[in-house]
Amino acid sequence: MDSSFNKISLLVYFLAFFFPVLRNADYIGFQVFLCVLLYINDPILFLCWSANIVFGIALIAPAGSWKKFFLSFASLAFGSVLITYGHIPGSDIMGNNPEPAFYGTGYILWISAFAITFVGSIIDLRAANKNAVRGSHGIV
């Protein structure tokens, strides 16, 4: 059972690379994606970045499996943690008041890609369970 949700979410994911992650900062999604080494010391930012890895694993997980469901949920949860961060990374240098973050199109597309995969995993899981029930009752 192959779902088109993976293709749609991948398209949305790559679109996020070309849009600003924050409305009040100049960097786009691709720049943020490449700066993983800057996030290693900050657990919240690193958890958010690791959503990319979990998302990639979720995409290759079999459609209609609980594994895909949990991985897609984890990528959505990890990516959503950024909302709790609340300020632009690096704007609180030397103890200054951090500049608040206003999330941009890139972040919204990024999270949307995770949400599309999650919704697709739910739909595929329901379809797989329905087929299994039909098969166990001898209905073809």
Image: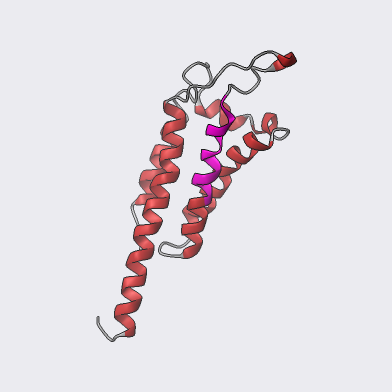
Q: Which residues are magenta?
A: 74-86
Residue 65 belongs to the span the image colors magenta: no
Q: Where is the C terminus found, in terms of image quarters?
A: bottom left
Residue 2 visible, this angle: no
Observer-nearest of 100 and 89? 100
Q: Is residue 86 above or below residue 8?
A: above
- At a point 66% along the width and 20% down the height, the residue shown is 90
Q: Is residue 67 above or below residue 30?
A: below
Q: Is residue 133 above or below residue 115?
A: below
**Where is residue 31 drawn, in percent x and y?**
56, 26
Q: Residue furthest bottom?
A: 138
Q: Is residue 88 above or below residue 134?
A: above
Task: Describe residue 140's horizontal placement relative to residue 111 as left or right.
Answer: left
**Where is residue 139 drawn, in percent x and y?**
25, 83
Magenta residues: mostly which secondary structure?
helix
- At a point 73% along the width and 33% down the height, the residue shown is 41
Task: Describe residue 84's horizontal placement relative to residue 62 as left or right.
Answer: right
Observer-nearest of 3 and 97? 97
Q: Where is the N terminus found, in terms of image quarters?
A: bottom left
Residue 78 belongs to the span the image colors magenta: yes
Residue 68 visible, this angle: yes
